[in-house]
Each structure stands twice: as structure tokens, then as C-alpha cells.
Image (spheres, grey):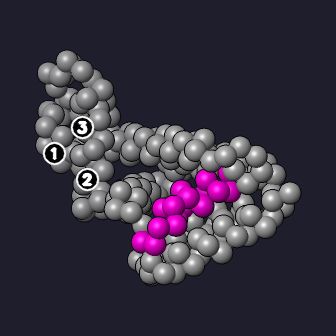
Amino acid sequence: MPDGSTNPIDARTRVLDAAEALVRAKGVAGLTLEAAARLAGVSKGGLLYHFASKEALLTGLIARMAAFIEEDFAAGVAAQPEGPGRVARAMLAWGFGQGMGAMPEEMTERCDRAAAVFLATFHHDPALLDPVRAVVAGMRRQVAADGLPPGIGGLVMAAGDGLFMARIFGTYTATPEEMDAMHATLSRLIEEALP
């Protein structure tokens, strides 16, 4: 291995973690191959072994984020009881942090990480977001096939997306009481729509 590592996955992960930290702290302008290598503790040659360019590094970041979103959402669906509304309930829990008022710290951290990666990637080249778009399209198909009347699951998804966008752009922060009220309203809407 160019960076002296015996495990290329570890070096690749360290580089991605470093790149993510850089875009969170400094935006896409602060992401350079040299800075990512230095922060990851690998040589520039070691970084180039895994990512030949800044675009390749951003592609790796967004692919990792897309895989995480897909796996995390699938786990959320699997945790819900089977039957109509399963995907909508998972979407509600996933987008609202289980309706526990303010988002749990872990979820807030994940939102901030995703926001940094999304914004950096979009700023560099919006087409690089295609892996996330594909995952979201799959989620939308699941919502549409969830056995609820049209619009219910989409509304739950749009509400979660709206909260995420508000967080990304800092337009507002819902209070714990607002989060609880929105969660309860959407939950009631799902339950009332069940066949």
C-alpha cells in the first residue's frame, strides 16, 4: 500500500472521515487532497491510491452517505410492525427522532454530517448527488407502496425533508414542543388512514 497501511479499508475510511471533517469545518473550498491526507494521517500518495482527485473524494463521500441512508432507513422499516403504514411510520421515526422532542444528539450529529457532505458535493457538481437521489427515489417507491391512501406517506416524508432542509440552511429550529406536536399530528394521520 502506498501509505504503508496493511488494511486499505482503514486508510480509505480515515481519508473519507478527514474529508468529511474538512467540509464540515471549512466547506468545499477547504477540502484539498493535501489537507485530507494530513488530517487522515496518510501520505498524499496513500490518499491518491484511493482517490485520484477532489471529485473522486467527493464521490466517495456521497456514495458512503447514500449507503448509510439506505441501510439506516431499511433498519427503521424493519423495526416497524408489518402491514400498511409500516414505511410511513419508519419515515416518521427516522425524520423526527422517534418524536422525542428535540432531536437526539446522535441524530443531530448525523444531520450535520449529511448536510456538510450534501452541500459540498452540490457546490462542486450537483450531478455527484445522483447516488442519494437514487436512494431517495427508492424510499419514495416504498412510501407509495405502503398501503396508505395517496399523499399520506409523501406528506410524512416531505415534513422530515423540510426539517432537514431547515437545519441545513439554518432557516429555523423547531422547538421540542413543535417537534412533538408535528410528530403526534403525523402519527395520528397515519393511524387514521390505515385500512
Task: Tell me the residue at 68%/57% (across/down).
Answer: 88
Residue identified by numbered label 2: 21
Residue 65, horizontal then vertical, whole percent: 44, 46
Marked residue nearer the N-terminal end (3 or 1): 3
Residue 118, horizontal then vertical, whole percent: 44, 57
How many other residues sit within 10 Å of disc 3, few (<14), some (14-19) or many (≥20)?
some
Marked residue nearer the N-terminal end (2 or 1): 2
The label on residue 14 is 3
- State the image quarter where residue 82 is shown: top right
CA gap, disc 3 to disc 1?
8 Å
Highlighted magenta segment, given as a residue range: 87-102
10 left or right of 127 in image: left
Question: Label 3's element?
Answer: helix
Q: Quadrant of the C terminus?
A: bottom right
Q: Are marks 2 and 1 in contact (CB under 8 Å)?
A: yes
Residue identified by numbered label 1: 39
74 left or right of 13 in image: right
Task: Tell me the residue at 73%/64% (across/down).
Answer: 190
Q: Amino acid at mark 1?
A: Leu
Marked residue nearer the N-terminal end (2 or 3): 3
- State the image quarter where residue 92 is shown: bottom right
Instruction: Choose between 66 and 52: the one closer to the eye.
Output: 66
- State the image quarter where residue 24 is shown: bottom left
Task: Tell me the residue at 77%/51% (across/down).
Answer: 84
How many other residues sit within 10 Å of disc 2, few (<14), some (14-19) or many (≥20)?
many
Q: Is residue 89 magenta?
A: yes
Instruction: Choose between 110 and 16: the one closer to the eye.
Output: 110
Residue 98, horizontal then vertical, whole percent: 51, 61
Question: Label 2's element?
Answer: helix
